[in-house]
DNA sequence: CATGAATGAGAGTTCATTCAT
DNA sequence: GATGAATGAACTCTCATTCAT
């Protein structure tokens, strides 16, 4: 595949992402992509054979970008509380961008593939738990946090984030609601200063 | 609508529920329902005009039944901790019945209707928060619980439950994982005996 | 399936047969059938799911009719020579109706399904051989025929008929050519009167 | 067209022949050829514009080779019976190579072009008849054969060969079946030694 | 000469929905 | 009320063929 082809593939992926963000997964047809990209039916099939292949490619690309962002942001930080705050802020930003993320498409895809016990989602979730657990333990060590069950707390945070994510796509969620819960979580970890 | 018609409508609803449980929402066609009910295409349309109408009717019926169950179970209340434990046990049971509930259909339907800010889900969630908040406050009053922010704690529990619910439908969840988190939640509320 | 449906199915089969006669097998699309029948795309699918299913149904029906015809014609038997002559006349008629038979479609279908060792064709061929063999033997017994190898002669006739059939569909064949060969065959069996 | 071009054209023909042998005619697409040859789509079109053009070129080449073989083999023979036996042996070999010949493609092509009264097949058939007729006459002259109708016998043999050829591609044929019929034919010609 | 990306026509198939009976 | 045949729109996917490079 030549340079030009790669560019086109990239262009299709970017356009497809917009479509998935807009319409989720099940509602997206190859025709939708074709029209969004303004290319021919056959032209799309040169690059991708199905909406599934497209979504997986979009997610893969997205995961790569996110990894980059994540690695960058925590490289320059210092205290555990600061890092956790930063992490939660990122999550909040993502959550509130509800018309601009792939959450719905991902969940719909996962529903379609329940049998496959989608490993990608599980891995991302577990990775989040591990990072948080480490962070909390390091906060305890530095005297910033108090927590009797770091693993439970880490899971708690991840479940809450999942819960807010799905709520943001279904019943809707406001910034105030997110802030309230994130503050509750931080308050539960920080040593009371009294 | 005569007695016989009502029975038939009821029969369709029960059969449709099984289909929604099995296949979610988007994947269900009127044809699926027709075949599952073993009635004629036209016959189905006499009662329901679309899968949306069907799902909403199924959910309405379900909600009624659940309310009944809920009211029953808390009628014989003892302590706040007992009630909360009972509530969480119910939620756990529901969660683990992952191949036998409407969660996926409900979420899929909500995705389809993001714009409508689906009031039903919001109402159910808020009702859950209110009940939990009351419960926690009564637990505090009775000296069973310690909690500085009952509202935050109630929201926390509901978000966690949402998170576990969606996880159970996507990446899967085990009983151990549910137990661990529910214990973590209870531990955070109960007065430490030391 | 009601009476009316059966009629329609029958109508589709008859129309499809004309199309297969006209265009063979591979060149026939569901669209062709739909247009020939002047019904809707979906309407055709109510009765037949593919051109393969259609062709097999056409052939089945044809085989039934042929069986009837065959049974009738040999019911009023006189001499072996007469029956054989009648048989060959029938074959000739079929052969020369080259724009009005399913030969091409059948062969094309057989080509598509070489692996399946199409049993229908084999059975028909073998049945033909058996009938001819019996006939020749009875002719020998009655003193009409002379033949040292009835089985070989029967096979010879069937192969010649196959050969003429395929030739009629490819390079073409004239009545004179058929007559010439059929006379040659009869001459080989009849006791020379000299 | 340069030397290199001729080589490439030759290479394409050889590869295409394999494809036609494998898949017949109708099932072969330009894409199949392109992929089998591992050349570019446009590249193929520089040499051949359609599968029809390709098949005709393959057949032409094949016919040339066969003529060569045929001329060679009969150059060194002596008696009519020997030559006929040799001829039938060749035909038998070809017949039984059922997964390795162009028969199916040729017939399929002929079906597509019934209107054109394909001259090539007719010429080949007629040439076969003439050769056999001459052979039989020469056998009669030399006292090897007895036959009252050499022309009829020649046609009989050619029709039988056609019949076995088509059978080998559809219902299948075994070596024993071929041998049986070829022996029957030879026996019909040879002077009985008794 | 050669490449291979691009186009668009067309085939197969499925369903929501209607309507005569 | 109930049936189920019928319609037609919509989607998926495949190729022959062209054309800029």
Image: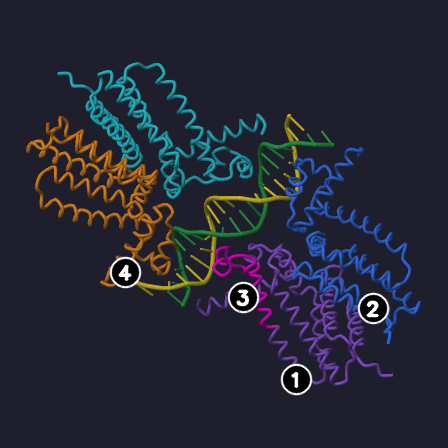
Chain colours: A cyan, B orange, C purple, D blue, E green, F yellow
Q: Nearer the viewer, mark 1 or mark 3?
A: 1
Spatial distance from mark 3 to mark 2, Cα to Cα? 45 Å
**Label number found at residue C76:** 1
Q: Inspect the magenta stretch and tell me whether residue C52 lies in it.
A: yes
Q: Residue furthest front?
A: D194
Q: Residue at x 46, y 29 (%)?
A: A14
State how far apart marks 1 and 3 are (Cα): 33 Å
Looking at the magenta stretch, what is its main secondary structure? helix
Q: Mark 2 highlights which residue?
A: D153
Between C49 and A68, the residue placed more toward the observer is A68
In three-dimensional space, the C-alpha distance between marks 4 and 2, rounded to whole angstroms, equals: 77 Å
Q: State which mark lies toward you, 4 or 2.
A: 2
In 3D space, how far apart are the residues under numbered discs 4 and 3 (Cα atoms)? 37 Å
Quarter of image, res B194 = top left
Foreground residue among A193 and B52: A193
For residue D166, side relative to residue D148 (left or right) = left
């Amino acid at each position: 595949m030549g340079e030009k082809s790669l560019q086109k593939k990239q262009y299709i992926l970017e356009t497809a992402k917009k479509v998935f963000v807009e319409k989720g997964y099940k509602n997206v047809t190859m025709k939708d992509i074709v029209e969004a990209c303004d290319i021919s039916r056959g032209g799309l099939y040169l690059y991708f054979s199905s909406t599934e292949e497209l979504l997986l490619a979009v997610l893969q690309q997205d995961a790569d970008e996110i990894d980059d962002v994540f690695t960058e942001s925590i490289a320059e930080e210092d205290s555990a509380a600061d890092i956790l705050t930063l992490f939660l802020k990122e999550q909040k930003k993502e959550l509130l961008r509800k018309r601009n993320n792939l959450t719905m498409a991902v969940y719909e895809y996962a529903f379609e593939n329940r049998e496959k016990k989608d490993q990608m989602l599980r891995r991302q979730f577990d990775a989040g738990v591990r990072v948080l657990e480490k962070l909390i333990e390091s906060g305890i060590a530095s005297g910033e946090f108090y927590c009797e069950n770091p693993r439970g707390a880490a899971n708690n945070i991840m479940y809450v984030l999942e819960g807010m994510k799905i709520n943001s796509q279904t019943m809707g969620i406001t910034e105030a609601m997110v802030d309230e819960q994130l503050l509750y979580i931080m308050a539960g970890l920080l040593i009371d200063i009294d």
